[in-house]
C-alpha cells in the first residue's frame, strides 16, 4: 500500500527543480560582470517532456490522457542560453534574472504550501479529526 500515492514524491521533485533553478539564477547574477559568461537556465519543459516520455514507455494509467508521473527519477536539466547581451560576450540579462528569481520564489512558496497542507491533512487524520 502506498500511503502518499506519489504526491509527496512529485512535490519533492518540484522542490528539487526550484532549488536547482534558484542556484542557477544566483550563479547567473554572481557572474553578471564576467566577460564571456553564458547565462544558464533550468528547463521545466524539458523536465516535463522527460516525465511524459517515461510515462508513455510503460506503467499503467487510470485514464489514457493522464500521465504516470511516478515512474523513474528525473532531475532538472541545466543548459546554456544561446544569446549575448553585452559586447564582452556576457549573456546575463539582469532584468530577466530578477524576474526569474521572483517567479521561482512564488513557485517554491506554492510547493512548500502544498507539502505543508499534505502533512497537515495527515496530522488531522492521525489525530482522528481533531
Image (cartoon, grey):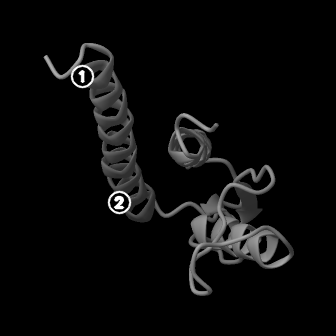
- The answer to which of marks 1 and 2 sits earlier in the sequence is 2
Where 21 falls versus 124 (above or below)? below
Location of mark 1 (residue): 124
Location of mark 2 (residue): 99
Image quadrant in which the N terminus is located: top right
Q: Can residue 26 be seen in this view?
A: no
Mark 1, secondary structure of its residue = helix
Residue at 56% across, 48% down: 10
Q: Nearer the viewer, residue 126 or 44?
A: 126
Residue at 39% across, 43% down: 111
Residue at 42% across, 58% down: 100
Q: Tell me if mark 1 has few (under 14), some (14-19) or many (20+) residues whose alpha carbon lies within 10 angstroms of its own.
A: few
Q: Quadrant of residue 78?
A: bottom right
Residue lying at the far right in this picture: please name it. 57
Q: Quadrant of residue 27?
A: top right
Where 88 falls versus 27 (above or below)? below
Q: Mark 1 near mark 2, Cβ–Cβ under 8 Å?
A: no
Q: Where is residue 58 in the image (x, y as percent from the top left)?
A: 84, 72
Q: Quadrant of residue 87?
A: bottom right
**Distance between the alpha carbons at the discs numbered 1 and 2:** 38 Å
Left or right of residue 121, residue 107 in this image: right
Residue at 79% across, 67% down: 59
Q: Tell me if mark 2 has few (under 14), some (14-19) or many (20+) residues whose alpha carbon lies within 10 angstroms of its own.
A: few
Mark 2, secondary structure of its residue = helix
Residue lying at the far left in this picture: please name it. 130
Where 88 falls versus 21 (above or below)? below
Q: Position of residue 73 (x, y in %)?
A: 79, 49
Where 8 falls versus 116 (above or below)? below
Amino acid at each position: 500500500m502506498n500511503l502518499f500515492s506519489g504526491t509527496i514524491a512529485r512535490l519533492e521533485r518540484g522542490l528539487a527543480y526550484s532549488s536547482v533553478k534558484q542556484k542557477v539564477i544566483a550563479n547567473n547574477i554572481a557572474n553578471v560582470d564576467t566577460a564571456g559568461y553564458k547565462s544558464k537556465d533550468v528547463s521545466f519543459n524539458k523536465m516535463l517532456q522527460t516525465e511524459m516520455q517515461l510515462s508513455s514507455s510503460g506503467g499503467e494509467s487510470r485514464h489514457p490522457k493522464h500521465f504516470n508521473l511516478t515512474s523513474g527519477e528525473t532531475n532538472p536539466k541545466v543548459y546554456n542560453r544561446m544569446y549575448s547581451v553585452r559586447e564582452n560576450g556576457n549573456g546575463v540579462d539582469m532584468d530577466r534574472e530578477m524576474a526569474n528569481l521572483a517567479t521561482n520564489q512564488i513557485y517554491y512558496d506554492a510547493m512548500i504550501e502544498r507539502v505543508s497542507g499534505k502533512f497537515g491533512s495527515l496530522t488531522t487524520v492521525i489525530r482522528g479529526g481533531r
